[in-house]
């Protein structure tokens, strides 16, 4: 389980490179504050790295010195940070072995791109806690291809999707275009497009800084964990997508205080009709912030064809009639509680405004997200997501010679272990009846 560094305590690394060698690295003499982790565990936090040299930076090596422990060295590699650019990079540290202690620590960069440097270290503290779940932020984009300013949101979430694909969840809700299907409901009421929201705050998020603010949220405290335990197509036709999520709170929550929802998301959507072309008010204008993704629009036409749309919401359990009870009952802290849902007729979802074109283009680029939120404030507490795996085979189950409806029903776990039909708990099972075997969800 990855851990966090509170967002208000940033380390502020500044790297300096030269054409032939790495000349030096400057680390601002600001303590990196107190970080938190579970005892004895390696944990990650994000920190801003600024390249003040003339060559790109692709790796850092640094030493962690912690009072009472042997020094630890870490090397982190990342996609290139160009000269003059800056980006948040995941660093790794290790926590003390004891619970509920606070130990002083220092971090010192010793190499950049494999070349040795020697600069002053910065100081901070590491405190251990019994429960430190990874905190994944949520960015939601309300958009439409008819909206001439919506390239702003497109560039923003594509940048996050590119830079932090495993750390930040992005979802795009389309309005009055081919992706605006009737199988989902908007989580919030908005009055203009594009609108970006982070963790469903009441205020809109800034497109130019939403990625930075999101990764700072990743570094902050989470009061509960969310884990996608299972995510699978139940059939070869991709009509049913099953997910199971487990939530664990740090402390007691009252009945109905929180809720959970499931979201079906697809990447890589394209279309040939005119309504798939993105209206573009930025043709011939300067980019609103530095990102090569802007070139598609600043150097493009007033209607941009051939775009690939990612993070598209296809269905969610907020939709009236989904049949999903989202409310979480009273739950004691550190008690896992699981929820399951199956999206049905996914392969029958049609493009908005079309009677013949289906929206499911890339089953291998679909995923399901589970989002935990506070019912009264609407604020997102945490989330998780996973790609939808193809329906697994049933090779662990050997069929017998009987093949009719009167044959005895036998139930097996996904791992192929036979279980009694009298004691089935909710979950996904393999049902064998004669020679026929199929997956079933017991509720």
Image (cartoon, rainbow, N blue to C red):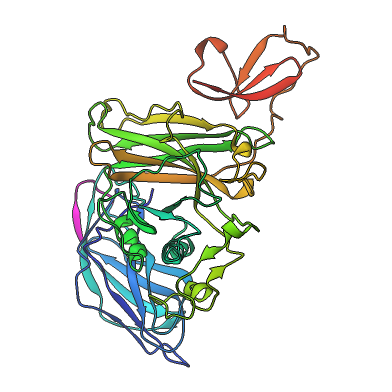
Let me know if residue 308 is in the magenta part: no
Asked if residue 191 can be seen in this view, the reply is yes
Q: Which residues are magenta?
A: 97-104
Answer left or right for 359 relative to 226: right
Give whichever of 272, 375 is nearer the camera: 272
Q: Quadrant of residue 84?
A: bottom left
Relative image position of residue 201 (x, y in whole percent): 27, 51
**Identity of the residue drawn at 20% across and 47% down:** 100
Answer with left or right where residue 33 lies relative to residue 399.
left
Which image quadrant is residue 33 in? bottom left
Seen in the picture, residue 385 relative to 91 is either above or below; the reply is: above
Say above or below: 150 vs 2. below
In the depicted view, which residue is nearer to us: 195 or 384? 195
Seen in the picture, residue 360 relative to 48 is either above or below; the reply is: above
Q: Position of residue 425 (x, y in %)?
A: 48, 19
Q: Residue 120: image x %, image y %? A: 25, 80
Q: Is residue 101 magenta?
A: yes
Q: Position of residue 367 (x, y in %)?
A: 53, 45
């Amino acid at each position: 389980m990855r851990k966090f560094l509170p967002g208000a305590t940033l380390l502020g690394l500044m790297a300096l490179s030269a054409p032939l060698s790495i000349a030096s690295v400057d680390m601002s003499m600001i303590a990196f504050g107190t970080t938190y982790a579970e005892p004895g565990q390696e944990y990650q936090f994000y920190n801003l790295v600024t390249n003040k040299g003339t060559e790109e930076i692709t790796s850092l090596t640094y030493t962690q010195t912690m009072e009472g422990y042997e020094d630890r060295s870490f090397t982190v590699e990342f996609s290139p940070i160009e000269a003059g650019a800056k980006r948040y990079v995941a660093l790794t540290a290790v926590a003390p072995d004891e619970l509920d202690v606070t130990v002083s620590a220092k971090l010192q960069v010793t190499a950049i791109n494999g070349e040795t440097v020697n600069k002053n270290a910065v100081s901070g503290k590491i405190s251990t806690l019994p429960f430190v779940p990874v905190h994944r932020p949520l960015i939601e984009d309300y958009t439409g291809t008819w909206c001439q300013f919506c390239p702003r949101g497109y560039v923003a979430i594509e940048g996050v999707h590119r830079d932090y694909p495993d750390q930040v969840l992005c979802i795009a809700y389309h309005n009055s275009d081919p992706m605006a299907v009737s199988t989902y409901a908007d989580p919030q009421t908005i009055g203009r497009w594009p609108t970006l929201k982070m963790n469903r705050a009441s205020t809109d998020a800034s497109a130019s800084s939403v990625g930075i603010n999101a990764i700072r949220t990743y570094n902050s405290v989470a009061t509960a964990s969310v884990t996608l335990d299972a995510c699978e197509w139940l059939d070869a036709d991709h009509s049913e997508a099953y997910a199971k999520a487990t939530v664990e709170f740090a402390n007691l929550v009252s009945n109905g205080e929180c809720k959970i929802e499931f979201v079906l998301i697809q990447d890589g959507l394209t279309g040939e009709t005119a309504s798939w072309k993105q209206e573009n008010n930025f043709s011939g204008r300067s980019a609103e912030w530095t990102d090569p993704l802007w070139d598609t629009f600043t150097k493009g036409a007033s209607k941009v064809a051939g775009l690939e749309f990612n993070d598209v919401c296809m269905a969610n359990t907020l939709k009236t009639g989904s049949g999903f009870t989202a409310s979480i009952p009273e739950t004691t802290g550190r008690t896992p509680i699981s929820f399951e849902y199956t999206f049905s007729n996914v392969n029958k979802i049609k493009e908005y405004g079309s009677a013949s074109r289906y929206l499911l283009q890339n089953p291998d680029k679909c995923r399901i997200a589970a989002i935990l939120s506070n019912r009264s404030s609407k604020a997102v507490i945490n989330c998780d997501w996973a790609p939808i795996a193809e329906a697994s085979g049933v090779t662990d189950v050997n069929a017998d010679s009987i093949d009719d409806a009167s044959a005895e029903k036998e139930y097996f776990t996904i791992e192929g272990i036979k279980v009694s039909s009298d004691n089935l708990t909710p979950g996904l099972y393999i049902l064998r009846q004669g020679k026929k075997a199929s997956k079933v969800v017991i509720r």
